[in-house]
Amino acid sequence: MTAGAVLTATPHAIAQPAAAAADKDAAEVDRFLADLEREARRGDKGLETFRSAPVKEAESVEAARVAAAVQGRKVEVLQLRTETDTVHANPDGTLTREMAAGPVRMIRDGEWVDVDVDLKAAAGGKVAAKAHPQDLELAGKGGTLPKSIEDVAKAPQDEARDLVTVGTGEKQLAVRWKGGLPAPSLKGNVATYKDAVPGGDLVVEATRTGFEQFLKLREAPEDGAPIVLPMTVPDGMTAEQNGDGSVTFTDAKGEDQVLMPAPVMWDATVDKKSLERTNTKPVEMKVAQHGNTVELTLTPDAEWLRDPKTTYPVTIDPATDTLDVLFDTFVQGGDTTDQSANTDLKLGWPGDHAGTTKRTARSFLTFRTSNFADSLVSKATLKMWNYHSWSCEKRGWEVWAADPADKNTRWAKQPALKEKIATSTETRSASCKNEGWVSADVTKLAQTWSSAKAEQGSLALKAADESDTYAWKRFRSSEAADQNQVPTLEVTYNYRPYNGINLQAGTPFLSQGGIFKVNSTTPTLRFSAEDHNGEDQVTGTFEITDTSTNKVVATLNAAPVPSNSTSSLKVPAGKLVSGKTYSFRTTTYDGTHYANGWSDPVRFTVDTAWQPTAAENALGLANLYSNAADITAATASDGKYASIAATEETTVSIPWDGKNNGIDIHNQLMPNTLSIPQGGTKGTQVGGNVVYTSSGPVDTVVQPTTDGGSRTLNIIKNSSAPREYETGFVLPAGMKAVTHDDGSVSLYSAGDDNADKAPQKEPAGFFDAPWARDANGKEVPTRYKVVGNKLVQQVDFDANSAFPIVIDPSWWSTTKKVLKCATYGLAPFILGFTPAGSTKRVITAVRLAKKIGFKKTAKLIYNYSKRRKMEPSMRKMVGALIGIETIKKNCKF
């Protein structure tokens, strides 16, 4: 028999053990099904309530897919949330990932919260962003206001106070201000320290990954405007000024962490058509570092400040931006400074020149693409928030595949444009009263990134006609204060099936040194057909090669099987010769997509003279009826255990002495010990299996499975064998073992007093319905009874039974198939059912299915498929339902 534990979920946490995550997913799907069943029983009124308050999010991909399929609308997958990514499951089973170019959420106190750069009053008179990825904090009121800008520059260091801090603890970086400050006025993400200097205001604007600070002068200063900004940096951080005047802050590991672009100043003149500042001037800056103190000395051009052509107010702007793999910037003719901290992206020509150079702009963006690598992309859309355009007339703009940009990207040093991907004419602008999203189809580019399994993907934006001013556009960048305006890449994708794992040749499916051995020229080949999409049917293709000649001797297709099950076929006669070694490899097709290439090959030797040992024979018989492709090879053994098999979630240890010791199933959630019915005192370890052979009427095989369970198969050799097989298990105090109508047994937690009729909680663990099959493949009647903490399987073989008989309930595979049947087959059909046009037989079946629930109905369909005894009313119900196409497709056992 196979045993395992399915445990109830714990509240959502950011990180959890793998075992807890797996069990939580299963429990969440079950809870969702229970909600559906409850509403279904309430009838149309209940379903209306359910549809008016639909499920919008689910913890796991599987649960979200179930909810989306049943509701006919997308459902967010909480497990896949990141700072930048939001993933939805769609009704058709695909996933759509929305990737923002900058952080849109962050973790605070173990929970996700939206990034909110609006400022608020904080403790101690300070100011803080409501939710900033870098814990941005600003100074409050304090000190004596300076009499001039020059006084601020000349003030001693001990008068400096933290103006802006980012980061916390040892990683905190602070920009300081030498002088007093008034109480700031707050508006959105901007703090204004009015009259912080005579004739000017100090302004700090929070951005999504950093901040900008401005000195806004209302009049020309008498002594110029020298600015000295001390900074404190973490231990080991160094500041280095770049050739363009910007400053890069590098940590002790040599990794760039913070960038301060070269400062610039501008006056109040703005071109109304392009919104470009028409009078700008670079600001000279010098950098000096002494230990943890960095001093920035800015010297604005005094003549430019006094020039009558300069229109006040004048803004002097040094910004600070943290660095990440996500990156966006723009380049513009005539500009020689980094623009990656800018809140804008631009493209096109605004109609002016810098000297003889046209001030044409292009933008570059980099997204993290590893999260959909090697997927099947069906749709990808780039979305940009277009807040200004030269004209309301539509003009083309292009998306190009490009090399990645970085802090050194300039108009004269642009990343290479590789291929034009898309052209869009969508145009919006606040001046046209339609500011908003514009988009371009970048499916081809996303498919390229996916196929290349790229960690990141980069693109460029440019005007289709860079001489046409009507094509000029401005977009919000990743630094946008409003997270709903951050550039976004939206990708809809699915996954192709895997090309095959766990390849085996048999029977008895045994390998030595990685080479299987068979004693037939018509052996069975099989593999695990895994697919991300649990509802697919997978067709396996087997290619067999003679290793001595390296020639392909056969390419064969197996019958379709449900995804995540075993694909197998028997090699036809005449293909193989005894005494030779062959290899075979596999690939798959799920009805829509082909796997990428072939699996790694596995070798097998044909030797018709080979006579398996008694243990090998017993294992071969057991494997005829079990999914041997899901066996986990032993990772160790010791004096007590012949096979110790560890999976990600569970360690299963099978003893040498199966008569006096039990199977130890150890995991973090529900450890258990199972006794072995008819276990012998001396086991033989064969490829991870442990075989107990005897001269008596019963041999026993115990197999550790890849799911973290253990499968015990009793091989009944003749009619003198016992008819009862006893498995002891641990039943913690207060827990209750309940036998269900289909013969399965569930263990319910303490306090669930009505578990036998209407359980309030998910089972803590269970044994699925038992089965027994004779040598002709016919079912033999069998059932369980629970006696204390013992599970007794009764087998009713008779004179008509063909020996040997193999018994086993096969818990893991049945449970997955039942769940699939309930969620993808029954729930959508029953919830969307309308009596109009339906036969009385189907209407009656739907009513009965609503009454007993989806999972129990799915188990009845399973029993029906195995030709087991059923009540006449239940048999009629199942007979009516399996003719429905969606149920037929998803309820194959």
Image: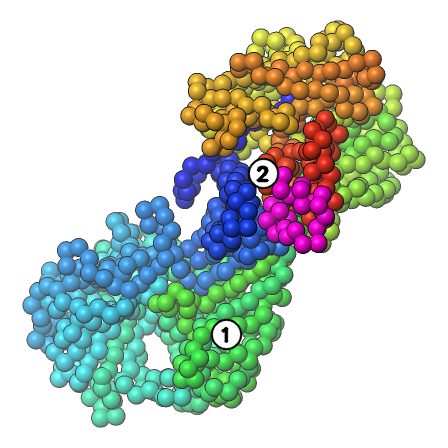
Q: Which quadrant would the N terminus be assigned to in this image? A: top right
Q: Residue at x 79, y 17 (%)?
A: 804
Q: Position of residue 845 (x, y in %)?
A: 67, 41
Q: Position of residue 151 (x, y in %)?
A: 10, 73
Q: Residue at x 28, y 67 (%)?
A: 189
Three-letter residue code for mark 2: Lys
Instruction: Decide which of tag 1 and tag 2 comes sooner along the chain.
Output: 1
Q: Residues within 10 Å of mark 2 (few under 14, many from 20)?
A: some
Please tell me the numbered disc located at residue 438.
Answer: 1
Residue 548 or 81: which is nearer the viewer?
A: 81
Q: Which quadrant would the C terminus be assigned to in this image? A: top right
Residue at which label 2 appears: 851
Instruction: State which quadrant residue 662 falls in.
Output: top right
Q: Residue at x 59, y 74 (%)?
A: 422
Q: Which residues are magenta?
A: 826-849
On the question of residue 88 being in view, the answer is: yes
Asked if the residue at tag 2 contacts the one at tag 1, i.e. Cβ–Cβ closer than 8 Å, the answer is: no
Q: Residue at x 67, y 20 (%)?
A: 783
Residue 285 or 127: which is nearer the viewer?
A: 127
Q: Position of residue 349 (x, y in %)?
A: 47, 85
Instruction: In the displayed orientation, state which residue is furthest to the bottom.
Output: 308
Question: In the figure, 500 relative to 680: above or below?
Answer: below
Question: In the figure, 509 relative to 817: above or below?
Answer: above
Q: Nearer the viewer, mark 1 or mark 2?
A: 2
Three-letter residue code for mark 1: Val
As for residue 836 lying within the magenta part, the answer is: yes
Q: Please, what secondary structure does the residue beneath circle 1 have?
A: strand
On the question of residue 240 being in view, the answer is: no
